[in-house]
Image: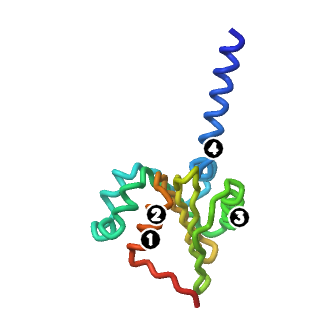
């Protein structure tokens, strides 16, 4: 009986820790502090995305399972730093960072084995910033193919 109880407690503990390993934990802990937040399944959110955008990036949209958006307003400098610490602590990899006219765009991904499980996009201007979290299940090779096919051009000044 003790062994069964120990297994159940261990399973619950491990499953709760596993759910905290993603952007979901940051979202849950900070959604009360943001100006606007929404979490929605991809099939619902894709209904509101312009068809032209979906067509151009349909390979990415097909792989997205869930969207989370957080908008932080002025005075959110501490939350910005908290987000940066979260990204470092959870070992998100940075795909790129762009700075122009005081605005910054950063794209991160969380990888498990050879799959990209999450993509985070942070757009910051002055003291305000927006974070978009995408729950995905896409291979690195598929992601690279999608980026190569797209019209995205990254240039440095």
Q: Which mark is residue 143?
A: 2
Kindly report the distance in space between the C-alpha atoms of the residues bearing marks 1 and 3: 29 Å
Which is more foreground, mark 1 or mark 3?
A: 1
Q: Which mark is residue 100?
A: none
How would you rate the neighbour count of disc 3 (Cα within 10 Å): few for under 14, some for 14-19, many for 20 or more? few
In the picture of the structure, the residue carrying the numbered disc 4 is 20
Q: Specify the quadrant of the image occupied by residue 48.
A: bottom left
Task: Classify residue 10 as left or right of residue 118.
Answer: right
> Looking at the image, which is closer to me, 157 or 138?
138
Kindly report the distance in space between the C-alpha atoms of the residues bearing marks 1 and 2: 6 Å
Kindly report the distance in space between the C-alpha atoms of the residues bearing marks 3 and 2: 28 Å
Q: Which mark is residue 147?
A: 1
In the picture of the structure, the residue carrying the numbered disc 3 is 81
Kindly report the distance in space between the C-alpha atoms of the residues bearing marks 4 and 3: 19 Å
First in sequence: mark 3 or mark 2?
3
Q: Is residue 145 visible?
A: yes
Which is more foreground, mark 1 or mark 4?
A: 1
């Amino acid at each position: 009986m003790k062994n069964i109880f120990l297994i159940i407690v261990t399973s619950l503990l491990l499953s709760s820790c596993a759910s905290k390993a993603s952007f979901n934990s940051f979202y849950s802990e900070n959604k009360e502090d943001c100006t606007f937040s929404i979490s929605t399944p991809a099939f619902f959110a894709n209904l509101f995305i312009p068809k032209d955008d979906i067509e151009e990036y349909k390979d990415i949209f097909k792989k997205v399972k869930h969207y989370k958006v957080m908008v932080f307003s002025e005075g959110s400098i501490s939350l910005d730093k908290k987000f940066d610490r979260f990204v470092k602590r959870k070992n998100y990899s940075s795909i790129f960072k762009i700075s122009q006219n005081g605005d910054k765009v950063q794209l991160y991904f969380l990888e498990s084995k050879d799959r990209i499980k999450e993509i985070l996009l942070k757009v910051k201007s002055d003291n305000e910033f927006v974070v978009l979290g995408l729950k995905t299940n896409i291979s690195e090779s598929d992601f690279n193919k999608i980026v190569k096919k797209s019209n995205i051009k990254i240039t440095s000044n």
